[in-house]
Image: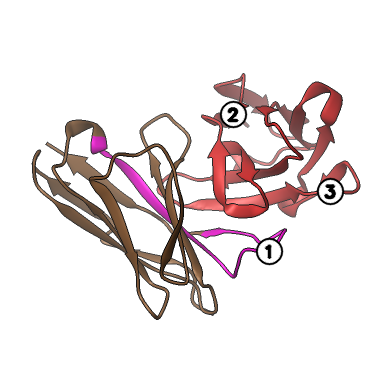
Amino acid sequence: AQSVTQPDIHITVSEGASLELRCNYSYGATPYLFWYVQSPGQGLQLLLKYFSGDTLVQGIKGFEAEFKRSQSSFNLRKPSVHWSDAAEYFCAVGFNTNAGKSTFGDGTTLTVKP
Amino acid sequence: ETGVTQSPTHLIKTRGQQVTLRCSSQSGHNTVSWYQQALGQGPQFIFQYYREEENGRGNFPPRFSGLQFPNYSSELNVNALELDDSALYLCASSPGQATGTEAFFGQGTRLTVV
């Protein structure tokens, strides 16, 4: 069975600093990987996705993620964090190709210091 | 274009009661997935409906059931509510089953069981 681990429950960064959120997955086949963001009281918004091809994927809001098969990782990065990035971030791995069926990690809460 | 809408936004039920949650999928989307998100955890896949048929189910007991209607809107029914059913229930719609299909999430229904 597939699983997703987000090792960092909570991360605090200063505004303008760089950010990396970690994600490790376990999946027996080619993974379909996603990063979502959730603000308080809101649903999930897709930041980016990886299905195949270039292992560095660009997303919305200046985020990018790199797929590393050898490390079973899909870490999310942003070069300069804005206060509005404070939210909870979820990594997910999709069942076959269908993004509607996904296994999620337990999330990383990002706090941004002024 | 109307997004995914869920109703109600909040509700409180008593243990042992039954509840129905509703989801209107985004225009043109024929696939609806339901997730349960307990406090401090990532969403867990409950089941998916595709063209009115169940298309995959997660590790949830039979008292969790669903329906999808000809207009692709969907209901999640939970019988014999337990305290542990208290959670945010998320609905996601997608335009099909093809590779790379993105899922769009609603704002969720917050269910509290007392």
Q: Chain of mark 3?
A: A
The residue under label 1 is which amino acid type?
Ala
Residue B94 painted magenta: yes
What is the x, y in percent for residue A22? 70, 26
Tag on residue A52? Answer: 3
The total of numbered circles placed on residues is 3
- Locate residue B29 relative to residue A94 in the image: left or right: left
- Locate residue B93 relative to residue B10 in the image: left or right: right
Q: Nearer the viewer, residue A104 or A30?
A: A30
Q: Which chain is brown?
A: B
Residue A78 painted magenta: no
Q: What residue span does the magenta drawing correspond to? A: B85-104
Q: Earlier in the sequence, mark 3 or mark 2?
A: 2
Q: Nearer the viewer, residue B113 or A15?
A: B113
Which quadrant holds the C terminus of chain A?
top right
Mark 2, secondary structure of its residue: strand
Question: In this picture, is A37 found above or below A7?
Answer: below
Q: Which residue is mark 1?
A: B98
Q: Which chain is red?
A: A
Q: Residues within 10 Å of mark 3 (few under 14, many from 20)?
A: few
The residue that appears at 11% across and 36% down in the rendered structure is B114
